[in-house]
Image (spheres, rainbow, N blue to C red):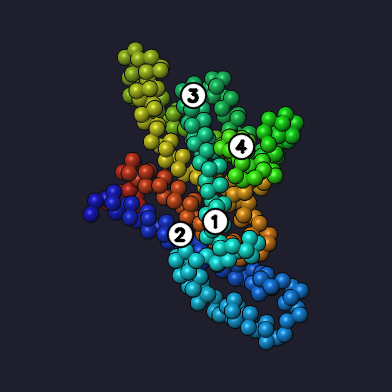
Amino acid sequence: MNRTVVFILKSIAKAVSLMIGVSILAFTLVTVSPLDPVRMNVGNTAYNSMSPEKKAELASYWGVDTPPVERYLHWAKEFLHGNMGISLKYNRAVSEIIRQKFLNSMVLMLLAWLLSGVLGFCMGVLAGARRGGLIDKLVQGYSIVLASMPTFWIALVFLMLFAVKLQWFPFGMSVPIGMDPADVTIFDSLRHLILPTITLSVVGVANIALHTREKMIDIMESDYVLYARARGDSEWEIIRRHALRNILIPAITLQFASISEIFGGSVLVEQVFSYPGLGQAAVTAGLGGDVALLLGISVITAVFVFGGNLIANILYGVIDPRIRRGQNGGK
């Protein structure tokens, strides 16, 4: 079988194994947590007034006395069939909530992902091409400062500056407060997306810019670039004909690998801006003891993050044969 195909199949198998591991870990953590599914469903007051027989009946219904392994297998089987349970906080099917929240988060993350990728790539190329110059120092300083700042702090600063003080953007939410959903226009939704998107993309720029800069420096110091300079090619021709061609694919793979970083930042950004996405739903489920919703979000987000890492890993392997040989034991 072709080495590339083997490499891709192995990468997919590893991703699936990791997904199973995440689902087992998430289910185990919820199982050993102090959350009582019976109390969470009926409430402490109603539970305390129940008879022992009724409590035993509810415990049996929720599988409290069922062995954890059996409970996990039952939950995993139902999950694979699309039945993720009922959310206590929203009183709706978990799959329906995740579908709605995930679409909101996807719009936010996709815009931030694209913006951070383009800005980070351009900044890294400029910094690497002008190593040691003013642009290089500015890009490095900007990236290092941003990388050291907590995401929630940047979001709070942007909220206070652009929404409270300057009043350029709304305070948060995904639509204007009090407006009938039928009256909300695309312009209204986009206006509410601008500030969270800028905040999330600003955080993701630093890592991409620094990595692109290092790759750009390596290319600009390579033998074929030195030969092009000796031949009399201009700096722009060297960048366009040699540097961009060699740096573009690694930058794309790095961009896919940054999905996990973007998603992690979106949880905090959604909380600060009260944006009704998957991150905010995860926090609500955790604080409210919504076990079914918490498990569903944990697995779905893991699929999303591992999917990005899988694409990045496959792209790296297809582009660089050394990675394939390394994972195949050097054969």
> Can you say whether 95 is above or below 66 in the image?
above
The type of residue carrying mark 1 is Ile
Residue shown at the point (35%, 15%) measured from the top left: 233
Crowd around label 1: few <14 · some 14–19 · many ≥20 (10 Å): many
The type of residue carrying mark 3 is Leu
List the residue tagged with mark 2.
Answer: 18
Q: Looking at the image, tell me whether mark 2 or mark 1 is earlier in sequence order.
A: 2
Q: Are marks 1 and 3 in contact (CB under 8 Å)?
A: no
Percent coordinates x, y for residue 125 in the rendering: 47, 27
List the residue tagged with mark 1.
Answer: 98
Q: Are marks 4 and 3 in contact (CB under 8 Å)?
A: no
Q: Looking at the image, tell me whether mark 1 or mark 3 is earlier in sequence order.
A: 1
Q: Looking at the image, tell me whether mark 4 or mark 3 is earlier in sequence order.
A: 3
Residue shown at the point (42%, 37%) measured from the top left: 252
> Can you say whether 299 is above or below 324 in the image?
below
As drawn, the label of residue 188 is: 4
Residue 85 visible to the viewer: yes
* Dot 1: element: helix
